[in-house]
Amino acid sequence: MSSKKRVSIPGSERAALPGARAVGAPHPEERIEVTVLVRPRSAATGLPSIEELGATPLQARKYMSREEFDAAHGADPNDIEKAKEFAHEHDLTVVEANSAERRVALSGTVAAISEAFGVYLANYEYAGGSYRGRVGDVKIPAELENVIQGVFGLDNRPQVKPHFRLRNAPGFAAAALSPEAAPHASGGFTPLQIGRLYDFPQGLNGSGQCIAIIELGGGYRATDLTAYFTQLGVGNPSVTAISVDNGHNHPTGNPNSADGEVMLDIEVAGAIAPKAKIVVYFAPNTDKGFLDAIKAAVHDNVHKPSVVSISWGGPESSWTSQSLTAFDQAFQEAALLGVTVCCASGDDGSSDRVSDGHAHVDFPASSPHALGCGGTRLEGSGTTITKEVVWNEGVTGGATGGGVSAFFPLPTYQSHANVPPSVNPGHPRGRGVPDIAGDADPATGYIIRVDGQQFVIGGTSAVAPLWAGLIALLNQQLKKSVGFINPLLYSNPVISGGSFHDIVSGNNDASGHIGGYRATNGWDACTGLGSPDGARLMNALTSQRGAATT
């Protein structure tokens, strides 16, 4: 690299967390690791557009194998070598290079990393803890301007939070988990009861499918899983933990920690699709850890997931543009491989817990290549739903996230969904969130075993694995992955017109002054198209084979 000229990576600008203050610098010899994302081989033409991915009917879709994807859209070996050369020139170690993921992992001292990427790293303290961070943008040699698309891991602030709500109701009797038990008097359901209320197709178990679950903290105990699934009477699913960036299955013993998230995800998905393989990718809660875990799951050529469940997220405004773009590209890669990505839409209503008086949507649910999963309050018994409304228990009890993206434009598949303009000043238009919904109110939540106890847990965190389990059943029956399902749900009237319970009551303005969104006939920015009628969705996909209409 002969040139000394440096350029900024577009969208890499960072600001300190609100209320955070710098308290000195990390030791210059401390070693850290970063992920460098390089361009795809197809950078000149780009990945296939959302129109190309979505307009193809299900029966005509041809997904790429992971080997085919690597050959067509992975990193060019020359670009990998350029990144390695850059690393060596700055005394950095190449930890790993993965062409399919377009990812080069580099490690080095704080001093070397700071010099290599033109940043100043400082230690920050804020009300929630401390982190190593930076402000401003990331700079690279001009020769690499079109080669390196992003650098992640310089800043290790907590990027997202889990979207679950734990009720203070421990100690349910084992009988409440039996397959034929009625809903508990407290209002809690087992996932099987939820499945019956939503008429999930019978006689299927997810056999032949793999559900990937992304976790950024906490852990599970095999003894808890065995006890839970034994009481449910569904058999114990195969659960495998994968370590990403030194993240590990590490239960804390506190049910209200990320343990509650991990167990909710596994137990809901495993109850709905007990014969599907469940692979849990544990990574640190940073932008680097999150992205690396998603890449690892999408491009896992051993377990080959057909659906990914993500119950972690944060407001779009807390992300850098390079992160929003990189994550969305990872989901677009998933679409090319026939992998569905389900993302919780958040538990803090239309503000998404941002205190600036404006509405915000949660990311990654706002990615147009993700299936955004909103929340309802569900009441019913047996197979009969007696009432279902938007989940909104206020600031304390939580409310479904949803709204209009400030970053992603309106995707083609939502062009006829009547997505309203944002309630924010200027009323811009953008991607509408969520796409679909399911039971999320802790008052009518899911009976889950965590750290040796049983609780009722809610939150849109429950909806992502619920839909992931349903999609595993759909894939099993169809003998083909539904993959990027969003366009099929919106553009086929046979599907959108009869495969959902349309939620028409409620709103998601939890604070009462942000200006949220109201439920209405058809799609809305609280519950999307509605909650599922699983059997009708299966029949629609089977009979119509997902043929899109224009």
Image: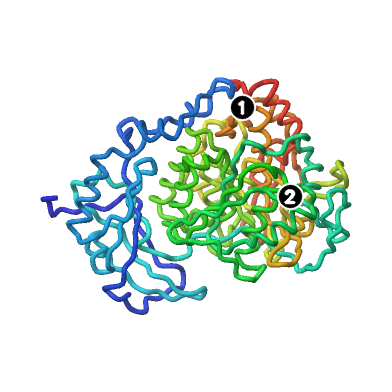
Asked if residue 391 is positioned above or below residue 450 in the image, the reply reads above
Sequence-earlier tag: 2 or 1: 2
Q: Quadrant of residue 167?
A: bottom right
Q: Residues within 10 Å of mark 2 (few under 14, many from 20)?
A: many
| Count of marks placed on residues | 2
Residue 429 visible in the current orientation: no
Position of the C terminus, as image quadrant, is top right
Asked if residue 490 is positioned above or below residue 155 in the image, the reply reads above
In the rendered structure, the answer to whether residue 34 lies left or right of residue 259 reads left
In the rendered structure, find residue 491 and report the number of the disc placed on it.
1
Nearest the viewer among 413 and 103 is 103
- Residue drawn at x 80%, y 53% is 189
Residue 209 position within the rendered picture, expressed as x and y whole percent measured from the top left: 61, 38
In the orientation shown, which residue stands out farthest toward the left?
A: 2
Which structural element holds mark 1?
Answer: helix
Asked if residue 122 is positioned above or below residue 410 in the image, the reply reads below
Q: Which residue is mark 2?
A: 439
